[in-house]
Image (cartoon, rainbow, N blue to C red):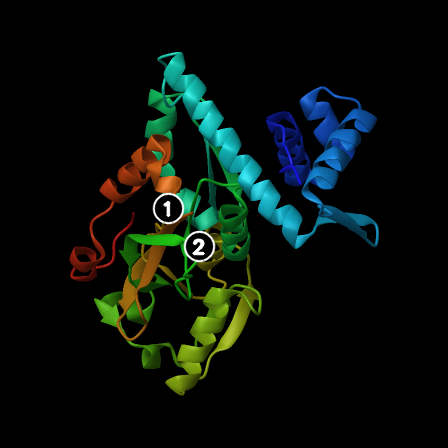
Amino acid sequence: MAEPRISFDALAAFAAFADTLNLTRAAAALHLSQPALHAKIQTLSRELGRPLYEKVGRRLVLTPDGEQVARFAREQSDRVGRLLDDLRVTPMTRPIVLAAGHAAYLHVLGEVIRTTLAERPGSLRLLHTNRGEMLDAVRAGRAHLGVSVLDAIPNDVVSLPVATYPQVVLVPEAHRLARRRTVKLKDLAGEELVVPPQNRPHRVSLERAMRAAEVPWTVAAEIEGWPLTVHYAALGVGLAVVTGCVTPAAGLVARRVTDLPQVTYHAVHRRHAGDDPRVAALLTAIRAAHTTPTSRSRRAPSTC
């Protein structure tokens, strides 16, 4: 029996579809008609002998086989792109995709992104994701590199620490705790805090720590994202426990909470993605922009 033959054209078409799970948008991006794109995907599915997507309710979703094929297709597209760059003697010209959340973009990656884009305009494409979405994007090949705080280190991707910060409490300059260099959780007893919505990782870990220390506190407001959290703390709504790289607003001071664990941001990529010189260069720049976790842990809390 002859081995199935898979065309790169069909793989590229399926990768575009997998990124949107929308035949109309994918066809437009490829400058194809929707029937032509559908035919390419059906041919690929028939050649592989596997269904690649299915309809669930009103949505199209990839099958497990489809996820695997999409990941392979993206990797092949990257390899072909790098080959073409090398043949044109213009390496590292294709953009790499970086996935991270609001806090990482603002406080960990901002300067690296600014410098990278100043030196090589168009060399980055940024995906805004939460922690789970970042890992999904990296695993599926939709992102070359992801950056986030991780609760647990996954074993199916490469994970490297890039920056570690203490946790600090933001208090008004006139607050009783502003006179302290550091505080403990017990010092927050009875305080009203500006916190993330329930079930967010930071909220969960803070509640767990306060409960273990038997510290009573109340919710002043539930706010999504560090910028609004800092803003409402500056308005006097309540105190806020944040990562130490967050810059206090005018009228606030940051005091390290010594019995809360430090927070480490990790860069995550697929096992062979580090062979891509574009990914390696970006990862080197990110790690070089921050001190090592060991040296940072010995310092007082500061901004990024």
Cβ atoms at labels 1 and 2 below 8 Å apart: no
Decide if residue 9 is on the left or right side of residue 235.
right
- Residue type at tag 1: His
Name the outermost residue toward the top. Answer: 88
Q: Secondary structure at mark 2?
A: helix
Graded by Cα atoms within 10 Å as few (under 14), some (14 to 19) or many (20 or more), the crowding at tag 1 reads some
Q: Vertically, is 111 above or below 225?
A: above
Residue 52 lies, in percent from the top left, at 71, 45
- Counting from the top left corner in percent of width and height, residue 86 is at 37, 18
Q: Can you say whether 15 is above or below 217 in the image?
A: above
Q: Which residue is mark 1?
A: 107
Between 280 and 103, the one lying in front of the other is: 280
The CA distance from mark 1 to mark 2 is 13 Å
Mark 2 — residue? 230
Which residue is nearer to you in this view: 252 or 94?
94
Choose mark 1 or mark 2, whichever is in front: 1
Relative vertical location of residue 273 with respect to residue 296 in this rendering, above or below: above
Mark toward the start of the polypeptide (1 vs 2): 1
Residue pictured at 33% horizontal, 82% vertical: 186
Is 148 rendered above or below residue 258?
above
Whole-percent x, y for residue 150 in the image? 41, 61
Q: Give the residue at x 63% y 38%.
A: 19
Tag 2: amino acid = Val
| Residue shown at the point (68%, 42%) measured from the top left | 48
Check disc 1 and report its element: helix, strand or loop.
helix
Q: Nearer the viewer, residue 29 or 131?
A: 29
